[in-house]
């Protein structure tokens, strides 16, 4: 209780600071399509200091005090073991849709789900694997493109089957075939040969994995499925797998140069805040957010915007959910009952906005182009930096470069990567 009170007080202080600083209409608008003449230098594999995480750059021993009973991950096992989990996107991660144990994630990817501005998340856990992650839902082809650069197991609940003739095929099963991956559908291959785990396909079919439905009438079917990561670790990850080197470059201190950026607005719908019935959290959809830099902690707090005209009026803090008093209520159908409580605020040490083309063969069917190159914006240590991203093939990792043409050095800690399509009518990034 003391922890929760402290969190509420801390958020109140932050909001009061933000209110004194923020001027959305006067903030600098990022030119997504700015021509940038940056000559990039080839980036190799970044070395990883022994005892440090390749994903966050933090000493693993310093993270052990956050580990709870039943948690696994690199901080506990010493083994690099990234896991990707699809988030449902309900309420865009606030209220009933808040990520379960989201403060433990190392990377959060946000991609557009619908042309009008809806988004979903992909969460990466490596340093610490909490007991429960989710809530999870269906995947799209763009998340498969991201998964391919990590080479990590990917857990989701169902997939998009829509498809159009031609090259912009949004059918996930077709994308799996093109990537040469083992399909999760009716799959009898050994667990160590699989990287895709579909919670819809698996239940009662080829693989009865430990995903659970929350037995709670207050939660709709679109946000009540969660994965038990430690059980996944034992069944899937703890099989002697090897993973691609995806180590980022990390800085020793605060970044130099750049211009001041204490508040960053990320708008997937820049003409209004989208909302449903405010009394029903299952119909509440906010897909615009702002990040506020806290210098004492060197992290960014995130808030979902409920009113674009006055973005600091009634913002919703990005806070995780946790589970207490968990009991299995139905072994056969994998149902659990638990008390859902609000946990810690979800913060980030690095913000990356990656601008891409998205072909949108239909309004609900994104086809982001995540190979090639494009512009990128970086926010670290209260500063803003311009740059570019490059990725030759889906098998390569995306490399982010600063204006000097070198791979940019991140701050140790978690990273937010917002993948924003070049849709200047709808999308917008501002900072002040």
Image: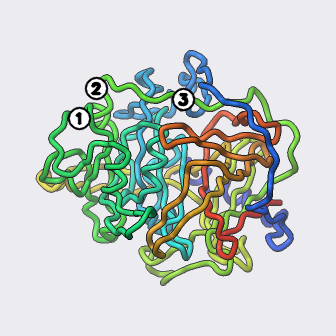
Of helix, strand and loop, which one carries label 1? Answer: helix
Q: Is residue 127 left or right of residue 162?
A: right
Identify the residue shown where x is 81% and y is 53%: 261
Q: Is residue 385 left or right of residue 223?
A: right
Identify the residue shown where x is 57% and y is 69%: 287
Mark positioned earlier in the residue sequence (3 or 2): 3
Quarter holding the C terminus is: bottom right
Query: Colour scheme used in the picture?
Result: rainbow
Q: CA distance from mark 3 to mark 2?
A: 24 Å
Mark positioned earlier in the residue sequence (1 or 2): 1
Residue behind mark 3: 63
Q: Are marks 1 and 2 in contact (CB under 8 Å)?
A: yes
State the image quarter where residue 140 is shown: bottom left
State the image quarter where residue 46 is shown: top right
Residue 2 shows in this picture: no
Identify the residue shown where x is 47% and y is 56%: 142
Residue 56 picture location, percent across and down: 59, 33
Relative vertical location of residue 247 with respect to residue 225 in this rendering, above or below: above
Identify the residue shown where x is 67% and y is 54%: 353
**Label 2 crowding class (10 Å Cα cut-off): few <14, some 14-19, many 20+?**
few
Relative vertical location of residue 48 with respect to residue 199 in this rendering, above or below: above
Q: Nearer the viewer, mark 3 or mark 1?
A: 1
Of helix, strand and loop, which one carries label 2? Answer: loop
Q: Residue furthest top?
A: 50
Mark positioned earlier in the residue sequence (3 or 1): 3
What number is the disc on residue 191? 1
What number is the disc on residue 239? 2
Of helix, strand and loop, which one carries label 3? Answer: helix
């Amino acid at each position: 209780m003391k922890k929760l009170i402290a969190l509420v007080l801390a958020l109140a202080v932050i909001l009061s600071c933000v209110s004194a600083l923020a001027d959305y209409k006067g903030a600098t608008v990022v030119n997504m399509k700015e021509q940038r003449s940056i000559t990039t230098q080839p980036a190799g594999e970044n070395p990883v200091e022994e005892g440090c995480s390749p994903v966050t750059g933090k000493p693993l021993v310093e993270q052990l005090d956050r580990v709870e009973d039943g948690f696994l991950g690199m901080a506990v096992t010493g083994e690099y073991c990234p896991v990707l989990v699809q988030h449902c996107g309900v309420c865009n991660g606030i209220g009933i849709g808040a990520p379960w144990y989201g403060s433990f994630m190392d990377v959060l990817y946000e991609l557009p789900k619908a042309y009008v501005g809806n988004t979903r998340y992909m969460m990466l856990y490596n340093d610490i694997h909490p007991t429960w992650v989710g809530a999870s839902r269906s995947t799209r082809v763009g998340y498969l493109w991201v998964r391919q650069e990590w080479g990590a197991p990917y857990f989701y609940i169902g997939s998009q089957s829509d498809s159009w003739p031609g090259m912009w095929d949004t059918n996930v099963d077709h994308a799996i075939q093109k990537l040469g991956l083992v399909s999760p559908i009716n799959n009898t291959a050994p667990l160590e040969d699989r990287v895709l785990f579909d919670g819809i396909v698996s239940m009662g079919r080829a693989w009865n994995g430990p995903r659970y439905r929350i037995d709670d009438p207050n939660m709709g079917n679109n946000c009540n499925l969660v994965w038990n990561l430690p059980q996944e670790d034992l069944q899937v990850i703890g099989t002697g797998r090897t993973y691609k080197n995806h180590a980022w470059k990390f800085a020793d201190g605060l970044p130099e140069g750049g211009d001041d950026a204490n508040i960053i607005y990320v708008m997937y719908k820049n003409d209004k805040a989208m909302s449903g019935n405010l009394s029903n959290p299952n119909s509440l959809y906010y897909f615009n957010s702002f990040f506020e830099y806290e210098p004492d902690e060197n992290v960014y707090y995130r808030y979902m915007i409920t009113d674009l005209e006055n973005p600091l009026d009634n913002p919703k803090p990005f806070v995780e959910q946790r589970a207490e008093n968990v009991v299995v209520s139905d072994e056969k159908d994998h149902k659990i009952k638990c008390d859902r409580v609000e946990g810690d605020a979800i913060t980030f040490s690095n913000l990356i906005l990656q601008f891409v083309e998205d072909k949108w063969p239909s309004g609900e069917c994104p086809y982001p182009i995540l190979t090639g190159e494009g512009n990128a914006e970086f926010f670290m240590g209260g500063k803003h930096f311009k740059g570019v991203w490059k990725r030759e093939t889906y098998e390569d990792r995306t490399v982010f470069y600063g204006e000097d043409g070198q791979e940019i050095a991140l701050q140790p800690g978690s990273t937010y990567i917002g993948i924003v399509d070049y849709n200047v009518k709808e999308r917008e990034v501002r900072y002040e």
